[in-house]
Amino acid sequence: MQFSKPGNSMRRWSLVCVCLLSVGCIEQRGPAPASKIVARDGVFHVHPGDEIQAFLDAAAEDAEHKIVRVHSGVYRPSEQGQALIQFNARHEGIRLEAEGAVTLTAANDEIADKRASTFPAVVNHVVYFGDGISRRTILRGFRITGARGFVTRRETQRAIEPNSHLEGMQTGTFFFSDGGAVKIFGRSYPTLSDVEIVDNETILCGGGVSVEHRGGESDSARFVNCVFRNNRCPGTGSAIDLLEGSSAVIENCLFVENIANTGMDEISRTFGLTYNSRHGCGALTVFPGSRAVVKRCTFTGNWNGADDRGEGSVYSKCIFWQNIAHDGSRPGGPYEIDILDARNVEGCFFNGATSDLHGEVDAGRNVLNAPDPRFDAAFQPLSPEYSEVGYRAIVAEEASSR
C-alpha cells in the first residue's frame, strides 16, 4: 500500500485488478426513465418500491426543483452493479433527504450469489459521488449499510463516472474496491449530514467511506453529525480513507468499533505492499498529500484512532478514548493518534495504550492522560471535563430544522 501519488498507486495495485475483474460480472439495466416523474409541491417523493435513481435523474432535469425526499423503508439494489445510487455532475445541487427511518443497503439476498463470500451484497458502493459535485449537493438523514466487498467493473447502460475519459480521472483499483458505503471520486465535494454508516466491509480499504479526489483540492468533502460504526477492511481507513490528494471536513461525528488492518499480512505476502504495517491504520486514515479538518468528534473502541501523514490537518476538541480493539497481528501495539504534523492538534483528550505514537502532540494544549469520559448509550461524555469536547447526538427534529 505504498503511495507516492495516485498514478503510482494504481500501478502498484495492478495485480489486485486481476482479482477484481473476476468478481461479480452480471450486467444490469439502467434506472427507470425520469420523464414520467414529476415533483409535487416542489419536492420529488420516493416511496418503497420506487427506484431512487430515477427520481435523482428527474431532479437533475428539472431546473427549479432539486429536493428528493425518500420516505421510510429499506431501499436495496434491484440488480447487480457498481452502486445503488450515483451522483454525477448533472446531479449537482440536489438534496437527497430521508423522511423517517430510511435504510440504503448494498444487500439483496434474492439476487445475490449465495455461494459468494460477499453475499448478500450486490453493489460495490451504496452511494457514489462523482466528478463535478459541490457542497450544494447534500445527502441527509440516511442509514447506509450492507457492503460486503462485492466488486464488479461491468458498466450499466450509463457509466457510473462519465468523466473517466478526462486526464487524471481514469478509474483504477481503488475506484471499484474502496468505499463500501460511500465512494467520493474526482472533483467531488458533497455534504453528508446526519448519516449513519454502519456495518460495511470492503476487500481493500475504506470500509465505510473512500475519498479519492486525485489532487483536486479546490474544496473538501464534508461530514457533519454522522456516525461511523462497525465498518471493516483489511487495509487502511476502516471508517474514512482519504487517499492521496484528498480533503475532508469532519464535524461532530462519532467513530466507534471500526476495524482496519485485518488483512495486512495477506496483502503483503500476495502483493508485496505495506502501509503502516507495524501498528496498522485507524478508523480515519489520511494519506500523504491529503488533509483532514476534524472538529468535536469522538473516536472510541476502534482498532486505532486516526493515522495522518498529511500536512496541516486540524484536530480540535476531539476525544480519543481506548481505541484498542486490535487482534495482536501487528507487531506494534494500538494507538490513539499517529500523526507527524501535529501543530494543529488542540483541545483534544487522549487516553489509550499509546496516546500519541510519535510524541508530536503538544501536551500543553491537549490532555494526554485524560480521565474517563463516562459515555452514555449514545457515546456522549457525561464527565464535566468534557463539556465542550467530543461528539453530541443530534435529535431528528433538530437535524431537520437545519
Image (cartoon, rainbow, N blue to C red):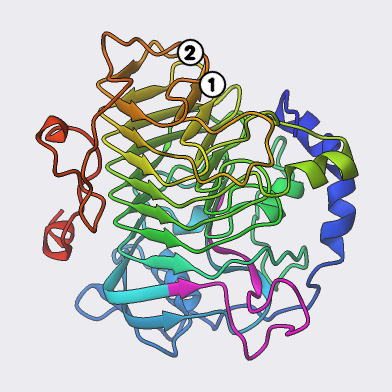
Q: Where does residue 43 sit, x and y in percent of width and height?
A: 26, 73
In this view, 190 is above or below 333: below
Q: How many marks?
A: 2
The part of the image, by quadrant, that contains residue 161 is: bottom right
Residue 21 is a magenta residue: no
Establish if 32 lies above or below 336.
below
Position of residue 230 in the picture relative to residue 245 (left or right): left
Instruction: Determine the main secondary structure of the stretch shown in magenta.
Output: loop
Mark 1 highlights which residue?
Answer: 310
Q: Is residue 323 left or right of residue 8?
A: left
Name the amino acid type tagged 2: Asp
Q: Earlier in the sequence, mark 2 or mark 1?
A: 1
Q: Position of residue 144 (x, y in %)?
A: 44, 66
Q: Indicate left or right for 31 with 151 as reference.
A: left
Instruction: Tell me the number on the disc at residue 341.
Output: 2
Whole-percent x, y for residue 106 in the image: 56, 72
Say what secondary structure mark 1 lies in.
loop
Residue ID at (23%, 48%): 375
Residue at 48% x, 58% y: name it. 230
Residue range of the region highlighted in magenta in the rendering: 104-130
Q: Mark 1: few, some, or many residues within 10 Å (few <14, many ≥20)?
A: many
Q: Are marks 2 and 1 in contact (CB under 8 Å)?
A: yes
